[in-house]
Image: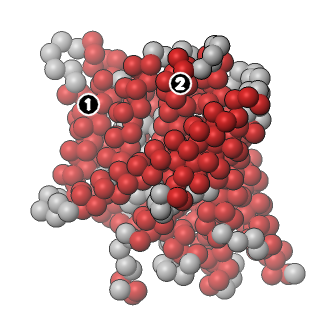
């Protein structure tokens, strides 16, 4: 009992730290989003080849982020696969010096426009803080691994202002078990972390959604069909991510910094076309969930650009995750699906656009990450609405079922298998 109390106290302290650090990280990215839009607008007003400005800016940001990774190789990518590997005793817990690398590298890469998510760096920073706090408390190796996992889950909670989602992420995705000490540590860390982060970024849901009516029971089969289609799309997206990662690695003669610069320049060109097609995607998601009506051709354009830009950005091997871009893709896919089936169904389906977009967030997340309960709860917390909970459950379950039937492994299992072995474990 004393050991459990001690672990919970350490989790509270570590949760407070990741709350303030993660809150500061989110604030920096929000400021970068604003600057990026202003830069693109300014570039459009310039005489001559103004498109070179965002290309150069994103290329520089990606290159600097790659320099950070050269100093701290563990900072590359999401980091969630490393947290899972540590829990499975396939890797060593991260050192605290990972924190500045993830923070600075993430702000540079994501802030410059790469289509990456804030949650990967925040989870990894939380894991580093949790491991360091456990070492300071002189806890055992097994407890250090558990606490890095628990505070990593708190990092996800901070990233999305979703404390229950962070708890479920630890249990469903990372540990795949229900141990009381892990539950308590994660709950304390997530509650403290989110509370502290709200002092920095404010106490409000990530997305403001107008009041919705729950879709009628007659639409439930349509949501299930949507889920099956989303599962197929999620499988394709996972394979695309891995294909980009593998093919970029197969260019050994090209320096890593040059690869990052080229990828950054391509994303910068996309940013010039439309700033909302780059970055994490929160602004685009908010505009759709807020009820903004987009032409179907515009939705297709955004979907295609982000569908390709996300895997390409991840292949740059700079700090950044996959979750936030997945949510934006799910939103776009939901709107597109409603637009495509509208002529085939009787009546007016316009009222289904926002509900389907919300459901798409959870279903696409479930299809790729294979953590359906986490995905549903995350979306409910981020949107502060339960009006579409029943169709969301049906669609997410159908999406995961389709992914399983197609034999596609969860994305983080595949990324974990591609992690280079540690020197002492080679």
- Secondary structure beneath disc 2? helix
- Please identify the quarter of the rendering in which residue 89 is found: bottom right
Residue that badge 2 annotates: 341
Identify the residue at image location x=53%, y=37%.
330
Identify the residue at image location x=63%, y=40%.
224
Q: Residues within 10 Å of mark 1 (few under 14, many from 20)?
A: many
- Label 1 vs label 2, nearer the camera: 2
Task: Locate the C terminus and report the quarter of the image it occupies.
Answer: bottom left
Answer whether residue 35 is visible to the viewer in this image: no
Identify the residue at image location x=49%, y=80%.
90
Residue placed most toward the observer, 335 or 259: 335
Residue that badge 1 annotates: 269
Up-down relation of residue 134 to residue 69 (above or below):
below
Q: Residues within 10 Å of mark 2 (few under 14, many from 20)?
A: few
Q: Earlier in the sequence, mark 1 or mark 2?
A: 1
Up-down relation of residue 149 to residue 342 (above or below):
below
Q: Residue 375 vs residue 65: left or right? A: right
In percent of width and height, residue 5 lies at: 83, 74
Q: Residue 369 vs residue 389: left or right? A: left
Query: Farthest left residue?
Result: 253
Answer whether residue 113 is visible to the viewer in this image: yes
Up-down relation of residue 50 to residue 106 (above or below):
above
Residue at mark 1 to residue at mark 2: CA–CA distance: 33 Å
In percent of width and height, residue 238 lies at: 42, 53
- Please identify the quarter of the rendering in which residue 102 is found: bottom left
In percent of width and height, residue 419 lies at: 39, 70
Identify the mark at residue 37; answer none if there is no mark. none
In percent of width and height, residue 1 lies at: 87, 81
Query: Farthest right residue?
Result: 1
Identify the residue at image location x=29%, y=25%.
272
């Amino acid at each position: 009992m004393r050991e459990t109390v001690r672990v919970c106290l350490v989790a509270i302290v570590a949760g407070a730290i990741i709350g303030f650090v993660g809150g500061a990280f989110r604030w920096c990215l929000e400021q970068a989003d604003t600057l990026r839009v202003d830069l693109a607008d300014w570039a459009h007003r310039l005489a001559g080849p103004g498109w070179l400005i965002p290309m150069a800016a994103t290329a520089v940001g990606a290159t600097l982020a790659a320099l950070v990774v050269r100093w701290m190789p563990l900072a590359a990518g999401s980091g969630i696969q490393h947290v899972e590997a540590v829990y499975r005793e396939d890797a060593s817990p991260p050192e605290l010096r990972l924190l500045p690398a993830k923070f600075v590298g993430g702000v540079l890469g994501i802030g410059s426009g790469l289509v990456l998510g804030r949650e990967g760096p925040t989870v990894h920073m939380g894991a580093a803080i949790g491991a360091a706090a456990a070492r300071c408390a002189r806890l055992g190796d097994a407890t250090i691994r558990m606490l890095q996992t628990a505070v990593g889950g708190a990092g996800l909670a901070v990233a999305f202002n979703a404390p229950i989602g962070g708890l479920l992420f630890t249990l469903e995705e990372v540990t795949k078990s229900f141990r009381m000490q892990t539950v308590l540590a994660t709950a304390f860390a997530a509650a403290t972390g989110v509370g502290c982060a709200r002092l920095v970024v404010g106490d409000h849901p990530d997305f403001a959604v107008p009041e919705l009516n729950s879709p009628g029971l007659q639409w439930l089969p349509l949501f299930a069909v949507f889920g099956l289609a989303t599962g197929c799309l999620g499988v394709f997206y996972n394979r695309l991510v891995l294909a980009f990662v593998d093919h970029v690695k197969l260019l050994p003669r090209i320096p890593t910094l040059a690869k990052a610069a080229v990828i950054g320049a391509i994303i910068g060109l996309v940013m010039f076309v439309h700033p909302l097609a780059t970055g994490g995607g929160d602004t685009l998601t908010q505009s759709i969930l807020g009820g903004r009506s987009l032409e179907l051709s515009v939705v297709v354009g955004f979907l295609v650009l982000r569908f390709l830009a996300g895997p390409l950005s991840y292949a740059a091997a700079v700090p950044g995750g996959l979750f936030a871009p997945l949510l934006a893709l799910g939103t776009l896919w939901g709107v597109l699906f409603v637009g495509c089936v509208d002529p085939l169904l009787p009546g007016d389906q316009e009222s289904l656009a926002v509900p389907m977009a919300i459901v798409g967030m959870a279903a696409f997340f479930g299809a790729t990450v294979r953590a359906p309960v986490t995905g549903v709860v995350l979306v409910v917390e981020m949107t502060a609405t339960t009006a579409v909970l029943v169709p969301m459950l049906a669609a997410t379950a159908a999406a995961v079922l389709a992914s399983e039937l197609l034999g596609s492994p969860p994305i983080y299992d595949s990324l974990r298998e591609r992690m280079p072995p540690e020197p002492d474990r080679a």
